Image: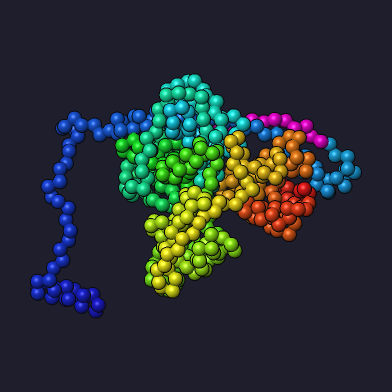
Amino acid sequence: MNKVISLSLLTALSLFGASITLEQMPKDSQRIDATQSNVILSYHNAIKESKKSVVNIATTKKSKQNDELNALMQNPFFKEFFGNRLPEFRQQERKSHSLGSGVIISKDGYIVTNNHVIEGADEIVITLPNDEKEYKAKVIGEDPKTDLAVVKIDAKNLNVAQFGDSSNLLEGDVVFAIGNPFGVGETITQGIISALNKSNVGLNQYENFIQTDASINPGNSGGALVDSRGALIGINSAILSKSGGNNGIGFAIPSNMVEKIASSLIESGKVERGYMGVSIADLTKDLKELYENKQGALILMIEKNSPAEKGGLHVSDLILEVDGIKIKNANELKNTIASISPEKSIAITYERDKKVKTTKIKLTKMDSQSVTSKDGKSTLSSIEGLSIVEITPQTRQQYQLSRDVEGLLVIEVEEESKAEKMGFREGDIIIQIEQMRITSLEDLNQALKEYKNSKKRVIINRQNYRAILVMP
């Protein structure tokens, strides 16, 4: 019955002259017949200079065998069973090798790449395009929070990448990924920009990825993503894949972020970020009904004596702008504040009780006892010889950690150092200091402040067994 009524109504509308006009593309569009005009479509000239700025990176990392076996032998069960007469297995050095890519950003040898490409490497060797000579590189600085790093080689008059403005990118733009996938040598793949401003991917602490379907495979990491002019618009970083191969979902760090981080690492060997002292979230569907503005970053918590508190911000305020830059969500606020230098005063526009207000706050430095030194290690400054990293999805995959493990991972303990004498070993996970649980560097900083004038019991996870060390 309903179908009959619908057809009858449509007929009636037609009889009375009702009509719908559909938008049509121009009919005089030109079509080029390549076979008749002898035309070959090519981007060769557009990207031929960009290729010269992309380098191959080979790293070597030394590790010691029998560490796990020695750790197992320290288990109380084995000690009691064997009467505390357990053998100490001799350590043997083992070398592991990996490949990646990088992009030259200065004529005198500065190269930007992914932090995970060179992290923990004992030797870094750079090979330039069409040049068999090998250059040993030194680490200038690392920023694990964005997965970027800068290394330098002793060379002059190199071919430098020309930066493009990643804020002008559009979905559908043609792009090319240049790198060294699987170690086969320089390779170019082509695709489009699939999406922009991708966050919550779970790769880095600060995310604002360009998503592309240009093939990015193992070894492409740290290489260039360029537009159809050959301008550098991103550094290829990761892929989403169950098999490890390319599934058409690749991510690149945008060039504007790369430029800021690389410049800071070259100038000081580290990145200092502005800090507000707030916990933030996106607006949910229900919360949007309570605010006039439907986009922004909602304040959930404000730290005591923080810049946000001193500036008069309250919990439930909705931050709309920072120095005139519109804020659409919590991730945009996090990235924007982190890109501003500490000690700078900024204007915050926010909504409270459905009224828009403005305040001035002076950012402080993000407090951390962890420093990124020029030898590329994330080190705990109060313990000589101890290198640690936060456990992120990326480090879980890299070090093959289970999902339920939390804490700070010890990635290196220098021989004869204070850390070694205290009993730390590579692979230990710091999970608690006295009564404070440790899941991040911020937790660690707080614990060190809380117990700074006394010896501290440090609880670690070692091969899924608990152990207690004493930190002076």
Colouring scheme, one of rainbow, by chain, secondary structure, one colour = rainbow
Residue 377 visible: yes
Residue at image x 58%, y 50%? 392
Residue 200 in the image, given as x and y percentages of width and height? 48, 55
Magenta extent: 88-99
Find residue 63 and report its image quarter.
Answer: top right
Find residue 376 and report its image quarter.
Answer: top right
Vertical comparison of 151 with 448: above or below? above
Residue 13 in the image, given as x and y percentages of width and height? 13, 74
Residue at image x 17%, y 76%? 9
Find residue 165 and report its image quarter.
Answer: top left
Q: Find out whether residue 417 is within the magenta segment.
A: no
Residue at image x 50%, y 66%? 313
Q: Is residue 166 left or right of residue 3?
A: right
Residue 129 visible: no
Q: Quadrant of the N terminus?
A: bottom left
Vertical comparison of 300 with 392: above or below? below
Vertical comparison of 394 with 48: above or below? below
Q: Is residue 38 left or right of residue 242?
A: left
- Which secondary structure type mostly characterizes the magenta part of the structure? strand
Q: Out of 200 and 1, give the one closest to the viewer.
A: 200
Residue 261 in the image, given as x and y percentages of width and height? 48, 42
